[in-house]
Amino acid sequence: MADQKQSDPAPSWWSRPAGPPPGPATDPEAAAGPAQGAEHGADHGAGAPPVPVPGVAPVGPDAPEAPVPASAPGPAYDPWSATPLQVADRGRPAAGGPVVRLRHVLALGLGVALLAGGTGAWLGVLAERRSSTRLELPQAAVNGKGRAPDSVAGIAATALPGVVTLHVRGASGGGTGTGFVLDPQGHILTNHHVVAGAKDVTVTFSTGESVGAELVGQDSGYDLAVVRVDGVRGLRPLTLGNSEDVQVGDPVVAIGAPFDLSNTVTAGIISATGRPITAGGDKGDGSDISYVDALQTDAPINPGNSGGPLLDARARVIGINSAIRGAEKAGAERQSGSIGLGFAIPVNQGKRVAEELIRTGRATHPVIGVTLDMEYTGDGARVGSRGEGGKPAVTPDGPAARAGVKPGDVITKVDGRRVHGGDELIIKVRAHRPGDPLSLTVLRDGREHTLALVLGSANGS
């Protein structure tokens, strides 16, 4: 223990003499009270002579004063003392007392907390990084975006730059359709019903660029129209195929903007060829009815696909998507969405009509020169007894008259293919060009006759 500095000389110590410890009866000084050095637990007599102890120098009033070494040890422990010496050096009390010590404790605690928080955050980030690295799922590398030319993706990549979306505004509202580029001059083929009554036509390319377009020509009987854009560079015309080569089961791809979803690609097959369909007829006078010897496909086609291309496996146009058959609903209503019955105008017919519309603004229709009885319910197409306005049912000197067709004849076949009604006969005839030779099989007086004729021409609407 550290020694306390004292002004008096350090006390000398007696070893306790042998014998019983002194008590009040034998120690007069103890009866008088504790000695001055009782703090250290030492006793000495006042007048008794000193008792010599071997090895211990005598001390007392008659003994010479012993010098105290500068490094004298502190008080020794006296095992016979009533209160053994236990002195602790507590040091100098800190300035400010307990309040300052509390502040030190709080500061230290705050520092430890900040250090612990920072360390924990760093360890958390490190653990998260390691954890995310360990949880990374395997993924295939990018092997390039190229696809086989005859795959759906390859066909779409080839054709999309040449397909456009048409936004049309008219007196009765607006609509959306599809078209495709025919030539570098900016001619675009679409359906008549897409642009019918249009006052403003906007063409949007697959790149997102939009330009205005002008109407070149249209024909309701074929449901085809041509519009033109000016000042557009880098046009990508689509290659036209041959619809005579189409076989049932051939894979096809349709591109359009169903419900204004531009550049939509769907795929399917050719479900049937030579499917006679009629569309339109909203005016009620028959002037807007279109007759199509159509290609049937199960590739999904919806409103907005009209006018878009139907492509073969070599990305060539084989048809112009035109109509769909909807599912029956309550009453006479039909569901407007696709149920897998889509119809396209054969490209051979579309090519001829488009060429005429670009050249003259109008298309010609092949005719046989008869008026049909559209109320006839039997099998085949019956020639009427009288024409419109009292005119003859068989046009004098027309193709049918020259071939020997008579009023009341029932036409049952065209080029050996059976027809079942007046609409179907019109469709089969319009699948040809004016001037084409045609073979008709007619039923007259219970007997069939085969007649050969050359198709005439009439201006379309």
Image (cartoon, rainbow, N blue to C red):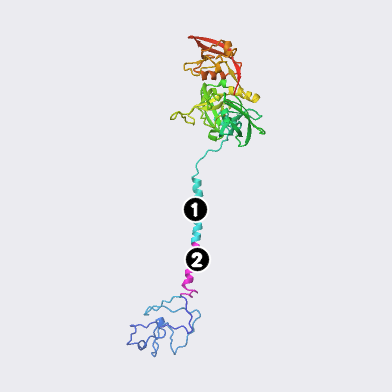
Q: Quadrant of residue 237?
A: top right
Mark 1 touches mark 2? (CB < 8 Å): no
* Label of residue 107 in the image: 2
- Residue 248 visible in this rendered orientation of the protein: no
Q: Position of residue 32 (x, y in %)?
A: 36, 88
| Whole-number angstrom distance, CA of label 1 to CA of label 2 | 25 Å
Residue of label 1: 124
What element does badge 2 sit on? helix
Compare marks 1 and 2 and give the one earlier in the sequence: 2
Q: Which residues are the magenta region?
A: 90-112
Q: Residue at x 40, y 88 (%)?
A: 50
* Label of residue 307 in the image: none
Q: Position of residue 166 (x, y in %)?
A: 59, 33
Q: Is residue 27 above or below residue 431?
A: below
Q: Magenta span: helix, strand or loop, mainly? A: helix
For residue 269, side relative to residue 364 (left or right) = left
Residue, far front:
390
- Residue 199 visible in this rendered orientation of the protein: yes
In depth, the one of 68 and 206 nearer the eye is 206
In depth, the one of 200 and 49 nearer the eye is 200
